[in-house]
Image (spheres, rainbow, N blue to C red):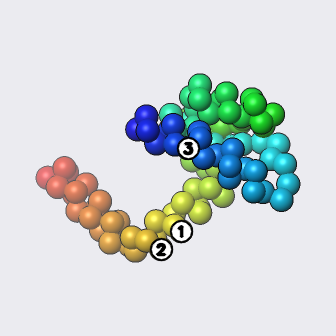
Amino acid sequence: MASVVRNAALTSPRILAQFPFRSLGFHSDNGSEYINHRVAEMLNKLLVEQAKSRPRHSNDNGLAETKNGAVIRKHMGFGHIACEARRSHQYLL
């Protein structure tokens, strides 16, 4: 996990530099991959304000959650939903 955070923090400035406009804000959920000292330091250097969703309120970040669902369906299909339902059903028995 630490290497993922480190790689994201190193890559993000390069990605942001390719935008045709200056980013003023960065909105994320409360995951540790977004809420940590390394990301905060990077955003401060870039003068980008960080905002985050409330914990356990996925509707606060509806657009991102919808896009995440579309990406998962594109790459995994709907098969993972049936697997999760079967696992949940086993716990109920």
Residue holding disc 1: 70
Residue 32 vs 64, above or below: the answer is above
* Residue 11 higher or lower than 34, as above or below: below
- Residue 27: percent from the left, percent from the top? 69, 43
Between tags 2 and 3, which lies in front? 3
Residue 58 in percent (x, y) is at 57, 47
SS for tag 2? Answer: helix
Q: Nearer the viewer, residue 16 or 57?
A: 16
Spatial separation of the CA atoms under disc 1 and disc 3: 22 Å
Instruction: Provide the residue designation for mark 3.
Output: 8
Q: Residues under labels 2 and 3: Cα distance?
A: 23 Å
Secondary structure, mark 1, is helix
Q: What's the residue type where badge 3 is placed?
A: Ala
Q: Mark 1, residues whose alpha carbon is within 10 Å: few (<14), some, or many (≥20)?
A: few
The reply to whether residue 12 is in sight is yes
In which image quadrant can residue 55 be found?
top right
Kindly identify the amino acid type of the residue bearing the numbered disc 1: Ala
Residue 29 in view (yes/no): no
First reached walking from the N terminus: tag 2 or tag 3: 3
Q: Position of residue 85 (x, y in %)?
A: 28, 62
| x and y percentages locating residue 82 in the rendered image | 30, 68
Circles 2 and 3 in contact, beta carbons < 8 Å: no
Residue ID for mark 2? 74
Which residue is rendered at x = 52% and y = 43% of the image? 7
Count of marks overlaid on the render: 3
Residue farthest along the top direction in this orientation: 37
Q: Nearer the viewer, mark 1 or mark 3?
A: 3
The image quarter containing residue 48 is: top right
